[in-house]
Amino acid sequence: MRKIVFLFIILLATFTSCDKVTQTERNLAGEWQIVSYKQMDTEGLSEYAVVNGYIKFETCTDASIACPYAISIHYNFPSSSGNTTENGTYEVIEKGKFMNIQKSNSPDPSAATYRCRILTETKTDLELEFSDAGGNIHTYIFNR
């Protein structure tokens, strides 16, 4: 009798748990406010920006296709300032630890796709990191 109960519990846990990609997509959906932006150059020197803006991930209804996103961030580093405004699609991959970003409004087709690492992802906190073509590492921290 114990074996049957144990087997039932194992089967129930197996069928009711969702995979990490689906869980990550569910947690990402919605609008996030940026609270920190760090840029590290190829020599390891970092600088932080005064920043405001958001990133919005649309809910994924079909895991087999990429989902829409939009980002609008204004940043002011000690050495430079500017805006990042883009939209396109994202696809969560590798057990929810990375995502591929495809920009739809990029003037440079070679820079239209990049890979983003998901460092932290909870219902209230999100930390993303990616490298640009020049080898600089950009780290964004968002909150809901």
Image (cartoon, rainbow, N blue to C red):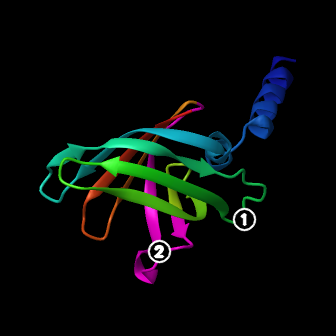
Residue 129 left/right relative to 53: left
Specify few, some or many for label 2: CA neighbours under 10 Å numbering under 14, 14-19, or 20 or more.
Answer: some
Q: Earlier in the sequence, mark 2 or mark 1?
A: 1
The disc at residue 83 is none
| Residue 51 shown left or right of residue 88 in the figure | left
Q: Is residue 87 left or right of residue 114?
A: right
Give the amino acid type for the residue marked by disc 2 in the picture: Ala
Name the residue tied to disc 1: 64
Q: Nearer the viewer, residue 9 or 131?
A: 131
Residue at the limit of the structure toward the top, as seen here = 2
Taking the magenta stretch, the answer to whether it contains residue 118 is yes
Q: Residue at x 79, y 26 (%)?
A: 9
Is 109 displayed left or right of 6 in the figure?
left
Q: Quadrant of the N terminus?
A: top right
Q: Amino acid at mark 1?
A: Ser
Q: Which residue is mark 2?
A: 112
Q: Is residue 93 above or below residue 12?
A: below
Identified at 46% across, 82% down, the residue is: 109
Closer to viewer: mark 2 or mark 1: 2
Q: Nearer the viewer, residue 105 or 114?
A: 105
Mark 1 surroundings: few (<14), some (14-19) or many (≥20) residues within 10 A = few
Does the magenta-highlighted stretch encompass residue 79? no
- The quadrant holding residue 48 is top left
Residue 111: percent from left, percent from top? 41, 75
Range covered by the magenta-colored residues: 101-123
Secondary structure found at label 1 = loop
Q: Can the viewer see residue 30?
A: yes
Q: In the displayed orientation, state which residue is furthest to the bottom.
A: 109
Check contact, mark 2 vs mark 1: CB within 8 A.
Answer: no
Residue found at x 72% / y 41%? 18
